[in-house]
Amino acid sequence: MIGFVREKIRSGEQINRDEALALLMQAELAALGVLADGVRRRLHPGKTVTFVVDRNVNYTNICVSRCRFCAFYRDAGDPDAYLLSREDIFRKIGELRDQGGTQLLMQGGLHPGLDIGFFEDLFSNIRERFPGITIHSLSPAEIVHIAAVSGLTATETLRRLKVAGLDSLPGGGAEILVDRVRRQISPSKIGWEDWAAVMGEAARQGLPTTATMMFGSLEEPRDIVEHLFRVRELQSRGGSFTAFIPWTYQPGNTELGGVPATGVEYLRVLALSRLVLDNIPNIQASWVTQGAELAQVALFFGANDLGGTMLEENVVAAAGCSFRMDMEHMVRLVASAGFVPAQRTTSYQIVKFY
């Protein structure tokens, strides 16, 4: 079967769920990498590897969802619970701008006291003060929560946030898009169909989006495959996913606990993502969870993008994973692997080649 699937991929045909599962479970790692690299080269014929200069501003760690895999959230009464002031948020964005950054990834917990007015006022002020910064912020779970707190539909919430300045919607909170798994790791968070509905509505309103997958918790291989195909099918029905970002669950300091996925497991899933998601242009390597060296290897397993430089990151760091990378390091990493580094915008427009 593997040989037949290999020929399908090389001829540009889409593979099905059974074939994808066979690849994940049976294909040799090197062979899987060669196949994924071939698809990457077909979609991106040159040697360009992109990245964006961004900052992840976590505006609050107060969250009513209390996901079992998360080490970042706090209850409102906890001594280290916080909600950033406007001054702190603007200072952080100013530092991003001063370092040539273009993307603001603002995400936080599901705070019970923040309605749409908070975000409308915040985004409109950011747009006015920092016109060169793209607001690539929130997540489907946050959209649904803001809508519920505000007595609105998700459609109305997205429309108002877009008017206020939201430019692009990240795909955070996807975890595994299988409700059997979600009920075990995040029982209070939205189900996969709600996640998909928000992403579909964002696309209809003209907002670019991304999709993610967190794997290595309690899912089975067939759940990983199902997640990928659900994302592919959403895209084929008019989705606006510009990129897919798989990353590994980090068990440190979490209620769920467990053992982190290995680098080999990460590369297998990354390669399969490139093979299945042939209708999504970009695959990001997760140096935030894997480190610089494995992210470099990922460039030969289907990834064509290294995501953001992330001047700040708090969620994964709360689980004890604290890889850092500045722009100079990222440029060297790409170049030493034989590729051409390029800074991009959120919409994948090239800002500068190095």
Image: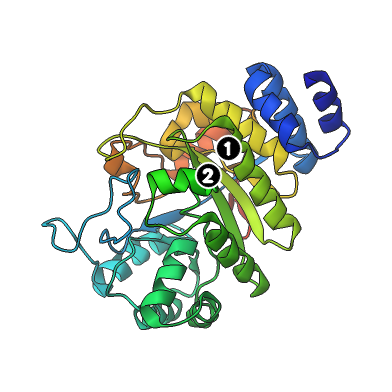
Numbered disc 1: secondary structure: helix
Is residue 220 shown above or below 90?
above
- Work out which quarter of the rendered image holds the C terminus and state it: top right
Give the residue type that dot 1 points to: Ile
- Residue 171 located left or right of residue 32: left
Tell me where residue 273 sits by quadrant.
top right
Tell me where residue 120 sits by quadrant.
bottom left
**Of residues 40 and 220, which is closer to you in this image?**
220
Residue appearing at x 34%, y 64% in the figure:
110
**Of residues 195 and 352, which is closer to you in this image?**
195
Cα–Cα span, label 1 and label 2: 8 Å
Counting from the top left corner in percent of width and height, residue 301 is at 64, 29
Residue appearing at x 34%, y 79% in the figure:
118
Q: Which residue is mark 1?
A: 224
Residue 330 appearing in the image: yes
Counting from the top left corner in percent of width and height, residue 107 is at 39, 61
**Of residues 345 and 154, which is closer to you in this image?**
154
- Residue 201 located left or right of residue 218: right
Give the residue type that dot 2 points to: Met
CA neighbours of label 1 inside 10 A, class few (<14), some (14 to 19), many (20+): many
